Amino acid sequence: MIAFIIRRLVQAALVMLAVAFIAFAMFNFVGDPVAIMAGQDLPAEQRIELRKSLGLDDPTPVRFARFVGNAVQGKFGLSYRTAEPVGKMIVERLPATLELSVMAMIVALAVGIPMGVFSGLYPQHWLSRAMMTVSLIGISLPTFLIGILLILIFAVMLGWLPSFGRGDVIRIGGWSTGLLSVSGWKAIILPAITLGLFQMTLIMRLVRSEMLEVLRTDYIKFARARGLSNRAVHFGHALKNTLVPVITITGLQLGSIIAFAIITETVFSWPGVGLLFLQSVQAVDIPVMAAYLVAIGLLFVLINLIVDILYFVVDPRLRSQSAKAGAK
Amino acid sequence: MSSPKLLEVRNLRVEFPTRRGTLVAVDDVSLDISAGEVLGVVGESGAGKSMTGAAIIGLLEPPGRIAAGEIRLEGRRIDNLPYHEMRKIRGRQIGAIFQDPLTSLNPLYRVGDQLVETIQTHLPLNQAQARARAVKLLEDVGIPSASERINAYPHQFSGGMRQRVVIALALAAEPKLIIADEPTTALDVSIQAQIIQLLKRLCREHGTAVMLVTHDMGVIAETADRVAVMYAGRIAEIGPVQDVIKRPHHPYTVGLMGAIPAMGHKVERLTQIDGSMPRLNAIPKGCAFNPRCPKAFDKCFRDRPEPMPAGTSQAACWLVQEPAHV
Ligand SMILES: Nc1ncnc2c1ncn2[C@@H]1O[C@H](COP(=O)(O)OP(=O)(O)OP(=O)(O)O)[C@@H](O)[C@H]1O
Ligand code: SF4
Ligand SMILES: [Mg+2]
């Protein structure tokens, strides 16, 4: 187990190095930072001065090493657009995105798993058929359209929920949370549903097909033959065996939720890193874009690591396999 | 009926409605099992052995269904019980052992937890008592250092050991009858005999009756008290095991007994007789065996023979009534 985690950590570090290199390459190949920072009318000598002071004339490996060294400390330089430290901008915005993404995932799991279990247990039931049809729509509608529809119904027509922003935010240490105020909860409902809808249909369909599969297995037949109650058979033996793929998908999808939050954040003017990224793209604000890339990459890697460890918790067969592999 | 049999199956018919008409997998099958008795069931693949067992334990997979007949356990009808009533009988009154021990156990549950949950489903024991019983059961089926192995997962056992665990699970609530559907077919030949011996010994000790489905006539000869020979969803012959083996009445049984392999030898198919069993949608009129029967005569193609007394056995063959044709 420990050996496995160490192996995964090394892999994660390599992945992060690759991501960092891409971010670093953006600095070198997309635009000239001096031109962007200083504008067109700076005299040539001062330009060279600036280049030197920014260390842009050093050899590439040195600059990359410096970039990584700074990145590890969370230093990505100053934003071209606002002249604020980029690390600080990202860190300030990250809680909004993370709260939205986790909330979207919770919505997707809390609704998707029960629906999948039900439609797996009773595939012929009219409700199951209805859910399958509706889920097709959920999969095929683009996110921004769903967001706009929800705004139209619940914000404009009914006036129940706000259509933009995070509501009242309370700061706890370095973390700003919207989940401690009523207006914050109201504000997160629509964007969380918008962002989670696709994953919800995905999880529902996954749980349903896994459930159908598992219910055909011999150990379910044998569990019934032992006289176990339906509840024990369905929610103990069957559901537990569908969890492994659900964990995989949840982990992988949490990463893409965070990445795809860009669209939802734009539709709902949600002050997260996605919105920040979009504004930075428009302003060719390379440091922010690079930092965003690294931050999202880091989240992806961390989530995958957690998913791998969860496998071990759920599936005993993996534990002994790695024990065997470790003994060799 | 002063002393009802443990299990009585009367005129059981199992059907599968399909798009191209109804398939009859079990056709008018009647058999009894007394308390503590071992009834062997043999027959070619597709003869309806497993379907008969599944019908008795109430686990026919839809669209399969019992279309006619009765199943009684100690005189009480059980084929028409609602699901939750039948559930209490499964495991408690009638246990089951399936073919493949590798897939019968849930891979994500410790064997001890699977035992404890089965015990607590049926018996009023607390966690500690149920665990103690689970350890005892594992010891009974010959698992070494049972009190430690109880915490192991199924994949940590070999195939033979897993089938021992399955037997422990089937016996967990002391059922009166166990339906063992080819309990050793999936196992290595070298351990098949051990498992059969274990099953036989435990059931004798606990007074448990067994319906033992197998392809292995050697196992039947050494283990069963009585034997039922099935063919195309019907019972061809049923009777005391020595009589059926030594003095078979049905021509199909005669063919089967032509070569009884020694116990422990794996026999894939019982095809000492030319030809093969008809498909369910092409069972001939009259006696289902008539295309392959060396003794068939005109009546066999016209009328269907019901099982009729033949010595100490019963055989579904017109020769019993009209020995002139033998
Ligand atoms: N879902 C189904 N639909 C239609 N026919 C089925 C279905 N399941 C089983 N059957 C048929 O029922 C018949 C009896 O099958 P059964 O499993 O009882 O045979 P068996 O005697 O146990 O054979 P084996 O020795 O191969 O286990 C077979 O001919 C099979 O084709
Ligand atoms: S009834 Fe006729 S065809 Fe059938 S087994 Fe007897 S002799 Fe053969
Ligand atoms: Mg079978």
Image: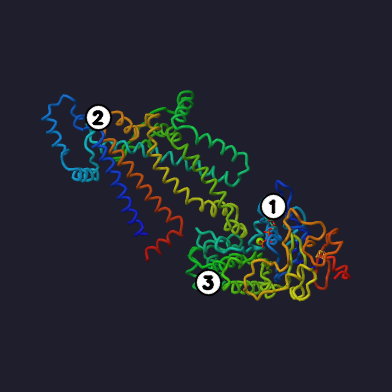
Residue B134 placement (x, y as % from top left)? 55, 67
> Secondary structure beneath disc 1?
loop
Mark nearer the viewer, 2 or 3: 2
Q: Is residue B176 visible?
A: no
Badge 3 vs badge 1, beta-carbon distance below 8 Å: no
For residue B64, which numbered disc appears in the image?
A: 1
* Left or right of A123, for residue B53: right
Q: Earlier in the sequence, mark 3 or mark 1?
A: 1
Tell me which corner region of the image, top left, top right, bottom left or bottom right, holds residue B99: bottom right
Q: What residue is shown at x 29% (from left), y 46% (from top)?
A: A18
Distance from the alpha carbon under mark 2 to that under mark 3: 72 Å
Q: Position of residue B17 (x, y in %)?
A: 71, 49
B137 or B200: nearer the viewer: B200
Q: Amino acid at mark 2?
A: Arg
Residue ID for mark 3: B143
How many numbered marks does the figure carry? Answer: 3
Task: Give the quarter of the figure containing the N terminus of chain A.
Answer: bottom left
Q: Quadrant of ligand 2?
A: bottom right
Q: Secondary structure at mark 2?
A: loop
Chain ID, mark 1: B
To which quarter of the image does residue A281 belong? Answer: top left
Chain letter for mark 3, please: B
Q: Which mark is residue A81?
A: 2
Q: From mark 3 to mark 1, how far is it between C-alphas? A: 37 Å
